[in-house]
Amino acid sequence: MRPLPNDDFAPAPWPVTTGMNILVVGVGGQGVLMISKAIALMAQRRGFAVKQSEVHGMAKRGGIVFSHVRFAEEVWSPTIAKGEADMLVALEWAEALRWLDHLRPGRGVFIADTRQIVPPFACRSRKAGAASAYARETPAEIVGRHADGCALDATGIATALGDARAANTVLLGRLSVWLDYPVAEWHEVIDAIVPKGTREINRKAFDAGRAWTAPAPDEDDAAAPAVAAPMPDLHISVAIDPAWCKGCTICVKLCPERCLAMEGPVAVVATPAACTGCRVCEWLCPDFAVTVKNEGVPA
Amino acid sequence: MSARLTALHGNHACALASIAAGCRFFAGYPITPSSEIAEHMSHELPRIGGTFVQMEDELASIAAVVGASLGGLRAMTATSGPGFSLMQENIGYAAMTEVPCVIIDVMRGGPSTGMPTRPAQGDIMQARFGSHGDRPVIALAPASVQEIYTETIRAFDLAERLRTPVTVLYDQVIAQLLESVAVPPPEAVHVSERKWANGAGPAYQPYAAGEDGVPAMARPGDGHRAHTTGLTHSESGFPTQSPPVVDRMMRRLLGKIDVNQALIEKYETLMADDADVLIVAYGITARAARRAVTVLRAEGVKAGLFRPITLWPFPEAPLRRLAGPARAVLVPEMNAGQLVLEIQRLVGRDPPVHPLGRIDGEPIAPDEIVTAVKELAVHA
Amino acid sequence: MLDAAPSRSFDPKDYLRLQYMPHFMCPGCGHGIALHALLAAVHDCGIAKDDLAVVCGIGCSGRVGGYIDANTFHTTHGRPLAFATGLKLARPDLTVVVVTGDGDCLAIGGNHLIHAARRNLDLTCLMLNNEVYGMTGGQASPTTAATRFTSTTQSGAIEPTFDACALAAAAGASFVGREVTRQAPALKTLIARALRHPGFSFVEVMSDCTEIYGRKNDLGEAPEMILSQKADMRPDSHRDATDQPFRPHALPTGVFVERDLPEYGARLRAHAAAIRKEAGR
Ligand code: SF4
Ligand code: SF4
C-alpha cells in the first residue's frame, strides 16, 4: 500500500474510522510531544476517544522521550503493547530502531528521520569522528523489512526551509499521508498547538513532509546515516619538541589515551591516531614541549 | 627671576629641593631625625601630581622607590642609620640594575639604636661599603641648609644622568637647623633627563653603554620588554656567569664612576694651598673647622681646610695635591674614625694623618679643632 | 560561528622569550605548568605584552618571570611586592603581576604580603607554593608540612605551617584563591579572574618540587606527585561533601574571597585630586 503524494484525489488509504495506535519516539528537545499532541487533537476532532501517555522524564536535551497515542471508539489502556503499534514515528534514527518491535508485524507503518544523535555511551573513543557503537542498520534495510513506511532526512528538509526545529512537523506531514484527513484540518491543528510566530514555517514543513517522495535508488545512499568512515583527523595533532622535553614523563603517564611514550630520555608520540586532542599533555608539560592542535577544542 | 630667600629647616629644604628636582615619588618609613622629610613630601607630592606612600619598613621603602623609578619616575626615600642599614641590599640592587634613585640619610650614631636625637656622622663607611659586593657609590655631604638644597638637586641630576643610586648624608644638626636659603627659580634648576631607549628595535641592548658608561634605559610599555635582574647580566640584561662577560660588565658598571669623576667630584677649600696643617672635614664638622681655620690663621698658624662635598668617590687628586706640601693632616669627624681611613689611604704616612673623633652625640666645637691643630703644628 | 572573527588562539610561544628556552627548572617542576597557565590567562585577558610587568623575587619562582616576553623584573629576596607597589603606583597603566614563592612571600617577604593585601593596590600576586626552598638545596619553608623531610628538617618538620590564603584574606586581600597545577585549565581561569579583579589578588598555586622535595620525601616521580594532588584537592564546591571525613587533609581550592573594596591606587589619586581642588591648583 503506497501512499499517494498529493491528496486531491487520494482516497483514505487506511481505515481511519476504526482507530489507531501510534508511537512517537525521539530524544529530548526534538518535539515528540508536539507530534503526539497534534495526532491526539486531530483524533478528538474526529470524535474518537483518545489516550496519550508519554515519558519525558529525561527530557532535558538528549534524553529519551516517547509518547503513545491511542484513539478509537473506545480506548482502555493508555499504552501500546509490543507488536500492536500501527505506526511508529521516530525523530531520531537509533530511537526508531529501538522501538521497532512495537510495530504490528506485517502491517505497521514506519516513519523516521534519518538524523543521528549519538549518545555519549555509544562513543568508544573520544576522538572526534571516530567510529561508534551507534546503530549500523541503514534506512533502506529497515524500511524494506516493514510493511510500509519511509525514512527521510526530515531535519535536512526543515533546515532547508529555515528552521531545523520544524523537523517534527515534517514527519507529521509525512504521517498525514496515512492518516489522511483534509490538509486544511491538519493546518488548523498545527496552528492550535505551535507558537504563533512559527505557524508559517510549521505549515510549510507539514506540506513538505506530506509531499516528500522517496529519492531514486541511486540517490538513496545519500540518505544513509553517516556511520561509515570517521572524519579525517587533520585538525588534531600532537607533537613533542625533543629539544625542550626534559623527560619528566608527566605527559606519558597522564595522557588518557596513552598516546605518548618515552623513547630514551624524551617523550615521543607513539600512537598519534589515538589522540583526541584533549590537551592534557600540553597543559601539564612543565616545559612547553608539547603542542596539541585541535581546532575543535579551545586552547 | 632671581633666587628667593627663605628660612628653612634642613629637612624641609631637602623635601622642597627634591620636588624642584622633579621628584614625583617618595616612599619612606618614619625614623628620627629624618621624618620631617617624609612629612613634607606627604604634604607636597599629592599637590603636584606626585605619589607619597608610607611603606611597612625601610626594605619596602627603597624597593618601592626603585620600582617607581623603573616605571620612569624620579624617586627618593629618606631615613637614618638603622633604616639605611635595612636598605643596603636594595641599594645594591639599584646599583646593579642601574636604576636612578636618591636616598637621604640623616645620620645618627650607633651601633643599633644609638642616640636617635643626637647628631653623628656614623654612616660614612656604611654609605661606601654597606651593600655587599663592589658597586658604584656616590655620596654627597652638604654642610648647610643651603647646601642641602643644592646637593639634593645635584643628587637627582647625578642619579638620573649616571643611572645609579645617590646618597645624601647629613646629620641631625643641619637637618633641624633653620637657615636662610636662596631658593633658585625653577628655570635655574637643572636635572639631566635619564637616557631612555627609543625605538623598539631588536638591536637594543638594555645594558650596552657608550663612552660615558651609561646605558639607555627601557621604559616599560615602550615596547622593549626588557629584563631587569640583580644577577650579573650581559648587555642583553639576562643573567650570565661567563667570567669574561661578568668581568666586562662589572668593570663598566664600576668604571661609570671613574669615567664621570669630573662630573661627580665637588669640594671646597679654605686657605689650603699653603697650609702646614690641612684639616679635612665634611658636613657640620666642616663648619667648626672653617671657624678654626680663621682663628688659627689669626694666631699665625698656617691651617687650611679641605671640605669634600662629594664624599664618595672621594676627590682624590685635589686632596693629594693639597696634602702633599702640608706637615700634617687632621680629620675631625663625629665618629670613631671613618673618613680618616680613606684619607690615610690616599695620603699615606707623609704627612701623617690624624683622626679627631667625637662619639658622645655632641658636635665638634671649633676650639677642639684649634687645640688639635696647634698640637700638630708644634709636633709635626 | 563561522562568520564571527576567530580570536587568535593561544600559543605559549608567543609569550615566551624563546631564546632562553627551555627554561632552567627541573624536570617535572610545577612552576613550568604554573607559567603556562599564567601565560594562557594573560592571553585570555587580552593583556598586551608591552603593558605587562612581571615582578619576581628570589628562588625558583623568581626565575619564572625571565622567560616571559614582557617587562620583567627579577628583584631581591622577599621584596617583589614592595617593588611592584612602587612600579604600579608610578605606572597605573601597566598590569603588574608578582610571581613569588612560599619562602619569598611568606618568610622573608611576609610583611610585604600582609601590607600589600591591606593596601589593596591593583596587583596580582601568584605564590607558587612547593613547600620548600628548592634553589638553595631544599630547606624547610613556612609551608613545609609537618613530618616532611628537608635538608633543615632531617628528622621531619615540626613547625606549624601558614595557610597563605587565610593569611592574605585576613590581611584584607580583596581576591584570594588557590588551585593545583594538576588542574591547569582551572588554574588559568583562576589567574584570569585574579588579573581582572581590581585590587590586590592573591593566588596560591600548589606546585610540585619534584627533584628535591619529591625525592627527599619519597613522593614518587613527577607524574605520581601531580596525580596525588588530586587526592589532596577539594574544589570549594565540594567542601561539605559527605566524604570529607575520609580526606581529613583535603586542601580546599577555588576562590575564597572576592570582595569589592576600594583600590588603593585609584583612591590615592582621587585623594590627591581632592587636595589639589581644595588648594585651587
Ligand atoms: S592531547 Fe595529549 S593527553 Fe590528550 S589524547 Fe592527545 S596526546 Fe593524549
Ligand atoms: S611532560 Fe613535557 S617535559 Fe615531561 S616528558 Fe612530557 S614532553 Fe617531556
Image (spheres, coloured by chain):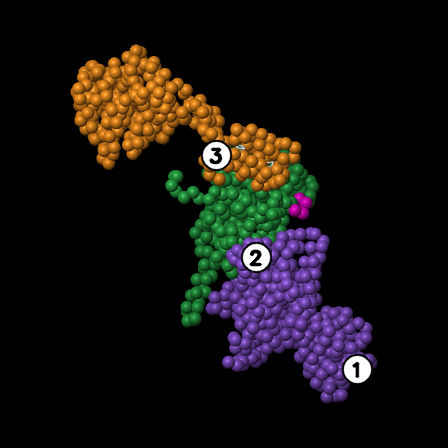
- Label 1 to label 2: alpha-carbon separation: 54 Å
Q: Quadrant of residue C13?
A: top right
Q: Is residue A130 visible?
A: yes
Q: Residue furthest right?
A: B379
- Measuring from the top left, give residue C25's x and y in whole percent: 62, 44
Give the residue type that dot 3 points to: His
Q: Are marks 1 and 2 on the same chain?
A: no
Q: Residue at x 20, y 14 (%)?
A: A15
Q: Which residues are magenta?
A: C135-140
Q: Nearer the viewer, residue B37 or C22?
A: C22
Q: Which chain is green?
A: C
Tag 3, which secondary structure? loop
- Measuring from the top left, give residue C101's x and y in whole percent: 59, 48
Q: Badge 2: few (under 14), some or many (20 or more) residues near its Cα, within 10 Å?
A: many
- Label 2 to label 3: alpha-carbon separation: 45 Å
Q: Main secondary structure of the magenta part?
A: loop
